[in-house]
Image (spheres, helix red, strand yellow):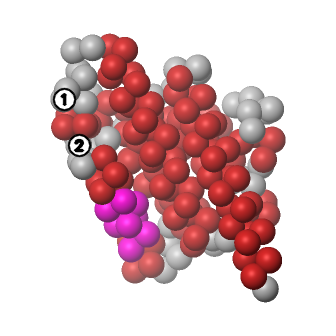
Amino acid sequence: MAQITSENEQETEELVQLAVARAANFYDTHKLCCSEAVIVTLNQGFRGDLSPQAALQLGSGFCHGMGGAGCTCGALSGAVASMGVFLGPHGKDGCKKKKFRAAVREMHDQFHARFRATCCRVLSKKVKHDKQAHWANCLQLTKGGAEIAVRLLLEARPDLVDTADRNFLAGTEGL
């Protein structure tokens, strides 16, 4: 039994790393904003129900802290939206409301613990006047949001390990 757990842990870790790299690629190379990169990566990488276009559209309003307002970080918002696709209580494989809300709260809490804030304005305050530093900062937030979301998603839905689109996550298939 220990070997099976170890294999599952290894597969999970591989998927986490692939998803983080893919979200970073969408942000850095394809110039998607943080929320778009996270939602597209999780939706397609774990075979969510959204079309690629719908995933992009869903993520577009969360960029720059809710459309530039500087509120909740788009990487966090995108992660929460992605969790809703897979774990939301109204989906075919969703969780009960209480369990879903606990998972979302855990997403928030882990993001806050790692980055010391959830507000885009606060997270980017020190780099807002340096375009390159701001881009690098948001890249780290995008990677962190994707990582935390994938870990929580696979913890709640271990069946997704077997159905994940590894080719997409590895970057061998386009958007």
For the residue marked with disc 2, what is the amino acid? Cys
Q: Image height check: is 109 above or below 117?
A: below
Residue 101, visible in the rendered structure: yes
Q: Residue at x 78, y 47 (%)?
A: 166
Q: Tally the numbered discs.
A: 2
**Residue sitting at x 56%, y 56%:** 150
Residue 119, numbered label: 2
Residue 51 magenta-highlighted: no
- Mark 1 vs mark 2, foreground winner is 1
Estimate the x, y position of residue 16 in percent, counting from the top left. Answer: 62, 52
Label 1 to label 2: alpha-carbon separation: 10 Å
**Local crowd at mark 2 within 10 Å, few (<14), some, or many (≥20)?**
many
Instruction: Name the secondary structure under disc 2.
Output: loop
Q: Quadrant of residue 105?
A: bottom left
Q: Earlier in the sequence, mark 1 or mark 2?
A: 2
Quadrant of the image occupied by residue 64:
top left
State which region is magenta: 102-110
Q: Is residue 13 found left or right of 138 in the rendered image?
A: right
Rendered residue at 80%/77% (across/down): 3
Q: Disc 1 designates what residue?
A: 125
Q: Which residue is at the front of the view, 29 or 113?
A: 113
The residue closer to the viewer here, 92 or 137, is: 137
Q: Residue at x 29, y 54 (%)?
A: 112
> Could you say whether the residue bearing mark 1 is in a helix, strand or loop?
loop
Residue 54 seen in this snapshot: no
Q: Residue 122, percent across and down?
A: 19, 37
Q: Would residue 106 be counted in the magenta stretch? A: yes
Amino acid type for the residue under numbered disc 1 = Lys
